[in-house]
Image (cartoon, rainbow, N blue to C red):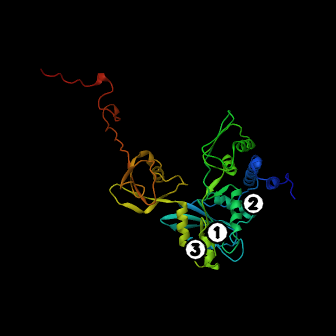
Amino acid sequence: YFSSSQDPAMGILERIKDIELEMARTQKNKATEGHLGKLKAQIAKLRSQLLEAGTSGSGGKGEGFEVSRFGHARVALIGFPSVGKSTLLTQLTGTDSESAAYEFTTLTCIPGVIHYNDAKIQLLDLPGIIEGASQGKGRGRQVIAVAKSSDLVLMVLDATKPHSHREILTRELETVGLRLNQHPPDISLIKKKTGGITFSATCELTHVDERVVYQILHEYKIHNADVLFRGDHTVDELIDVIEGNRKYVPCLYVFNKIDMLCIEEVDEIARRENTVPISCYMELNLDGLLARMWETMSLVRVYTKKRGGKPDFDEPVVLSADRGGTRVENFCNHLHRDLAKDMMYAWVWGASARHTPQRCGKEHDLHDEDVVQVVKKKKAAVGEAIGRFRQGPKDEPARIADRVKKAPLKT
């Protein structure tokens, strides 16, 4: 037993357990909504302290996985030990990742690159995580930190094991602020210096009311703020907005080892949302997995075209909504940082154009496999401008007295 003075993290974990026990004992009804909301806010604050203590206090040199970003997107493989993550990386990228019949074969992060649809996708094989990973068990925190920096999470599951494994992994990721297949809640929270709390909603709220919102804000010591709900959101989503450190990442649930199931069970798995059944051993449905990854990440390939020339279909500029955006301005910034400033307009061919070609501005949204030709502003050469806009040196002397007088007209 460790006292809280010896290890502050242990004291925080005990307090979290006490609050969770109190929540389990409390009946859920209209009268206890505010109390449960306060308890949830207290747990969220303690978990944030736990993460800060883990990153600043115990983290020494050499901890974590240092993998530099490469390619147009990053995909992380997460799952329990011995579910086939290393085999999947080897088959998709050709990178050798050690795989064996015992657990925890992979002890560090192994990167690989998938070349698909003219794009380079970085795939990271991470060590298997276990229950309690969010509290640091089995290098769990480092694994989850890499997942936070990725554009897509592939949760690899064993189709022959219980389906509760998916809920356990999701819970571990949500504990550290990772939200899978969710959108940021449409809640506006603007802190003020004075004026108290102003609460308003554009729709009918069924999960929270004004009293619950006030109690949660007071728990965070927020006494002056404007709160606006634009959707029917829950207490947990309001706490996510107040905390402000949540990461929303798309996730695909990849069920491996379907060659050990009957066709009815495979059909039942395939019909679930955000789920892809595969078999690494028999190489089943790996092409379908790549297509589903491409569709989920919503990558946009844009080809360049010079004036009077043919489009360059060899090297596309790959844009995504998560990495900057998919507008013409983002396309210009990928090519050169000053190109958006010098651009006058752009000609666009493809699915996003109403007619071919369409003359567009910086705000135009590009679609996959569009062709873009950027037309720059014309810069006048020095001395070309006329009148008072002329920039070059004048031929006549600076002083009027020094100018050569014209000969008088003959009469």
Q: Are marks 2 and 3 in contact (CB under 8 Å)?
A: no
Q: Are marks 1 and 2 in contact (CB under 8 Å)?
A: no
The disc, 2 or 3, on the residue closer to the chain's N-terminal end is 3
Instruction: Please give the name of the residue rendered at 53% of the width and 52% of the height, measured from the top-left corner.
Output: 324
Categorize mark 3 by other alpha carbons within 10 Å: few (<14), some (14-19), many (20+).
some
Label 2 sits on a secondary structure element that is loop
Kind of residue sitting beneath label 1: Val
Label 3 sits on a secondary structure element that is helix
**Dividing the picture into quarters, in which one does residue 194 lie?**
top right
Nearer to the camera, 234 or 81: 234
| Distance from Cα at disc 1 to Cα at disc 2 | 20 Å
The image shows residue 365 at horizontal and vertical percentages of 46, 52
Kind of residue sitting beneath label 3: Gln
What residue is disc 1 on? 156
Nearer to the camera, 386 or 52: 52
What residue is disc 3 on? 91
| Distance from Cα at disc 2 to Cα at disc 3 | 30 Å
Q: Are marks 3 and 1 in contact (CB under 8 Å)?
A: no
**Residue 341 relative to residue 73: left or right:** left
Label 1 sits on a secondary structure element that is strand
Instruction: Please give the name of the residue rendered at 29% of the width and 32% of the height, measured from the top-left corner.
Output: 395
Q: Can the viewer see residue 38 in this picture?
A: no
Q: Mark 1 or 2, which is nearer the eye?
A: 1
Quadrant placement of the N terminus: bottom right
What residue is disc 2 on? 136
